[in-house]
Image (spheres, grey):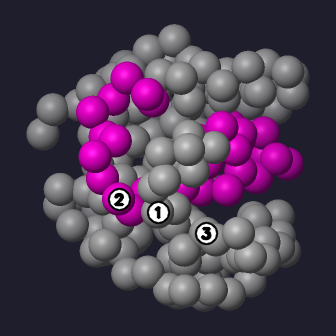
Amino acid sequence: MDKATLRRLYKQKRQALSLEAIDNGSLDISNQLLKLPIWNATFYHVFLSITEHKEINTDYILNILSGKDKTIVISKSDFESVKMTHYLLMDNTIIRKNKWNIPEPFDGIEISADKIEVVFVPLLAFDQQGHRIGYGKGFYDNFLAECRPETIKIGLSLFEAEEKIENVFDTDIALDYCVTPTQIYSFSK
């Protein structure tokens, strides 16, 4: 299927989920993440969930990272440049929702993308080749292009993989893994 069709389909599928299903799936995804060989890194980028879009609850991942004493990085989006600025998440970080309901740090200590070793990537859908569909603005493709090539990119999805996403662009950056409540997909480079 093409990106636009899949984007509409998965927005509908997500809206049909109960809050309990999202929470249970989020916990299962977090437990699956513990099986990945990613825990020797220091800098981990996590998106803060947009609850209005019924995204997975990343609080469980934040708890794992805190428990493992990892450095957590979160972002702020600039809709004019379609770029994200990255900040350390600290105990005193002030989080506010922007006008699109995206929770973001108000300010803080900025971290460059080339320091980030693992990125947990939000998505609507993904395929068996590791391609993903987000909301269509390109924030994450721009961000991932700024990261080092060896940065590990992990998609998080409440749904299983599509066979193939059509109309993938050269600028679309594929995932290394995608984790669902029941499965870990690994995409070899």
Disc number for residue 89: 3
Q: Is residue 131 above or below residue 22?
A: below
Q: Residue at x 39, y 71 (%)?
A: 142
Q: Residue at x 50, y 86 (%)?
A: 110
In the image, residue 57 lies at what x, y percent? 71, 39
In the image, residue 33 lies at what x, y percent? 45, 30
Dividing the picture into quadrants, the one containing residue 5 is top right
How far, Cα to Cα, is label 1 from label 2?
Answer: 6 Å
Ranked by sequence position, the earlier of labels 1 and 2 is 2
Q: Which residues are magenta?
A: 33-62
Q: Which residue is mark 1?
A: 71
Disc number for residue 169: none
On the question of residue 164 being in view, the answer is no
The reply to whether the C-beta atoms of the residues labelled 1 and 2 are less than 8 Å apart is: yes
Direction from residue 16 to residue 92 in the image, left or right = left
The front one of 67 and 14 is 67
Direction from residue 12 to residue 130 in the image, left or right = left
The front one of 40 and 83 is 40
Name the amino acid, label 2. Answer: Thr
Q: Residue at x 15, y 32 (%)?
A: 188
Task: Rate crowding at label 3 as few (under 14), some (14 to 19) or many (20 or more) other CA atoms within 10 Å.
Answer: many
The reply to whether the C-beta atoms of the residues labelled 1 and 3 are less than 8 Å apart is: no
How far, Cα to Cα, is label 1 from label 3?
Answer: 8 Å
- Asked if the stretch drawn in magenta spans residue 117, the answer is no
Q: Is residue 68 above or below residue 95?
A: above
Name the amino acid, label 3. Answer: Leu
Element type at marker 3?
A: loop
Q: Which residue is mark 2?
A: 42
